Image: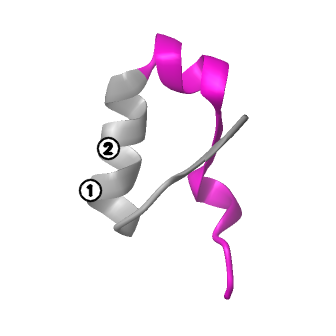
Amino acid sequence: MNVNTDTLVSISEANQNFSKVARLVDTYGSAVILK
């Protein structure tokens, strides 16, 4: 499985900036949130 590094987001960034994560999902179809 290939992971697009553009879709990697830290969990703290996801908490602070959820709309960015939502835009990534719209653009790439998925996002990976790192603990």
Left or right side of 17 for 7: right
Question: Which image quarter holds the N terminus?
Answer: bottom right
Number of marks present in the image shown: 2
Q: Quadrant of the C terminus?
A: top right
The three-letter amino acid code for the residue at tag 2 is Arg
The residue sitting at 57% across, 55% down in the picture is: 7
Is residue 13 within the magenta segment? yes
The residue that appears at 70% across and 61% down in the rendered structure is 5
Quadrant of the rendered image containing residue 6: bottom right
Residue drawn at x 45%, y 19% is: 17
Q: Residue furthest bottom?
A: 1
Magenta segment boundaries in residue numbering: 1-17
- Residue 13 position, x and y percent, is 60, 21
Secondary structure found at label 2: helix
Left or right: residue 6 compared with residue 27: right
In the image, which disc is placed on residue 4?
A: none
Circle 2 sits on which residue?
23
Q: Amino acid at mark 1?
A: Asp
Location of residue 28 in the rendering, given as x and y in whole percent from the top left corner: 40, 66
Q: Secondary structure at mark 1?
A: helix
Q: Which residue is mark 1?
A: 26
Q: CA distance from mark 2 to mark 1?
A: 5 Å
Q: Say which quarter of the image contains residue 18.
A: top left
Residue 14: x %, y % from top left = 52, 26
Whether the residues at callouts 2 and 1 have beta carbons within 8 Å, the answer is yes
The quarter of the picture where residue 25 lies is bottom left
Q: Looking at the picture, does residue 33 appear above or below residue 18?
A: below
- x and y percentages locating residue 19 in the rendered image: 32, 27
Residue 26 position (above or below residue 13) = below
